Image (cartoon, rainbow, N blue to C red):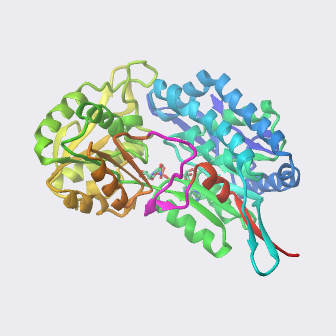
Amino acid sequence: MLKIKNYINGELLKPRSKVWLDNFCPANGEVYGQTPNSSQEDVDNAYIAAQSAFPSWSQTPLEERCRTLLKIADLIENNIDTLAEAESIDNGKPITLAKSVDIPRAASNFRFFAHAITQFSSESHETVGQEAINYTLRRPIGVVGCISPWNLPLYLFTWKIAPALAAGNCVVAKPSEVTPVTAFLLSKICIEAGLPKGVLNIVHGLGNTTGQAIIEHPEIKAISFTGGTKTGAHIAKTAAPMFKKLSLELGGKNPNIIFADCDYSDMLNTTIRSSFTNQGQICLCGSRIFVEDSIYEKFKSDFIQKVKLLRVDHPSKDLTDIGAIVSKSHLEKVLKYINNAENEGGKILFGGQQICVEGFENGYYMEPTIIEVETNNCQINQEEVFGPVVTLMPFKTEDEVLQMANGVKYGLSATIWTNNLQRGIRLSNQIQAGIVWVNTWMLRDLRTPFGGVKASGIGREGGFEALRFFTEAKNVCIKY
Ligand code: TXE
């Protein structure tokens, strides 16, 4: 049985706590590994290692830092098959997705930030009339904490770690206890790449034990977190009295707004992806679909036809479109939302049920689900379900759809389908979201700011935004 270890001070260690958690495979419901539930002592040890590594790592010439991070990227790529298989087994996502998206992106994260740090610069200001010049130093913070979720395990873990390390920080990181395996494999890769000991430390465990110890640690000066909004609020409350820097990427309830003048087939194919990729467990999924009434009935029928063709099956099969939901408790949560939606007057147009996949009867499978709703003010349109579930609703005017798009507590992303450029720009300007896609979805350029407004979080990741987060600005003023 796979036994995961912490990565502290360059070594793979059992938890001091001696407490282990079972690791379930969502595709068959079986326990196939154990992961540490690390205690405060383990986190303290990780901190001490990071703190001792900091003076040297923060002073390492950029070229050398860059070279080490590029080596990690290369090793991720060289191990793509192993990592993709591990991710698929641990998370339930189709292996084809892990191989084409998750793992390549993890390598890109390291490669991108390895280069970005060599191009990062700060400002200088001449104070005219006072004979003074100011310049800004961008210094690494010290030891920072990175906490990531289970939906895109290695992808999001590295999205935080890579900029933190590139900027010269040392890191105490915790992946989700639900999907710890690729983070463990990354520890081995870091050892092979020759990352100096203590620069990155990975501690495994539950949110309320290991995670809590990280956010409460008085010397871990910044926390980059992706996960649920409730957890984000708890982290903010805990960290505020210690004045920690926070970057919180939280939930979403994103609108997918479809106008009659769009490129219909592109919209239809992309809407299948934006609804159900990764079993709908991506914070960017467009879970509220609003369709202009003149094409509503046509869209409804075409969309149902296409969704019927999606194959729910074991994640290891090449033809699987929808794999297993990440955990039993999450599957139950998603099914409960569907049940409540029906009780609230939602009409299930397709799906809604748990599925039994032959040979894997204890796996956590469910049908892709389409629910027609009559109002945006219902639970299924207001709360993040985070599963293969979308709602449909017609709209008549731009104003009406804008009200509904903004009529939720979240503000992560939005998609607009129209060939009317003015309308696309007008709506993009008014939608309350950190990211707006017009005529596409999840097209990512790693240089762009990534994050949300309202209950979707604070701060931005990506590009120089991430490097700014992981550094402190210091102004030096010289009178000459
Ligand atoms: O997330 P948690 P959960 C949403 C989605 C999902 C809901 C809950 O709606 O249904 O959140 O999912 C760590 N101190 N998203 O409960 O708990 C935890 O161990 C420090 C959206 O799985 O927020 C894990 O590593 N850390 C999302 C990480 O937080 C703590 C992705 C995320 O887990 C902690 C995932 C604590 N007290 C879920 N408690 C997105 N934005 O993409 C938990 N953690």
Using the image, determine if residue 369 lies above or below residue 100. below
433, 355: nearer the viewer:
433
Relative placement, left or right, of 180 versus 75 is left
Q: Residue at point 43% right, 43% down?
A: 282
Q: Residue at point 61% right, 63% down?
A: 246
Q: Quadrant of the N terminus?
A: top right
Using the image, determine if residue 401 lies above or below residue 35. below
Q: Residue furthest bottom?
A: 130
> Within the image, what quadrant is residue 127 found in?
bottom right
249, 389: nearer the viewer:
249
179, 278: nearer the viewer:
278
Tell whether position 448 is magenta: yes
Q: Residue 35, image x and y in percent? A: 63, 40
Q: Residue 70, image x and y in percent? A: 73, 34
Using the image, determine if residue 477 lies above or below residue 57. below
Using the rendered image of the protein, determine whether residue 17 is visible from the camera's viewpoint.
no
Range covered by the magenta-colored residues: 443-460
Q: Residue furthest front?
A: 129
Relative placement, left or right, of 30 versus 272 is right
- Magenta-highlighted stretch: main secondary structure? loop
Tell whether position 234 is magenta: no
Relative placement, left or right, of 474 versus 116 is right
Q: Residue 164, image x and y in percent? A: 70, 51
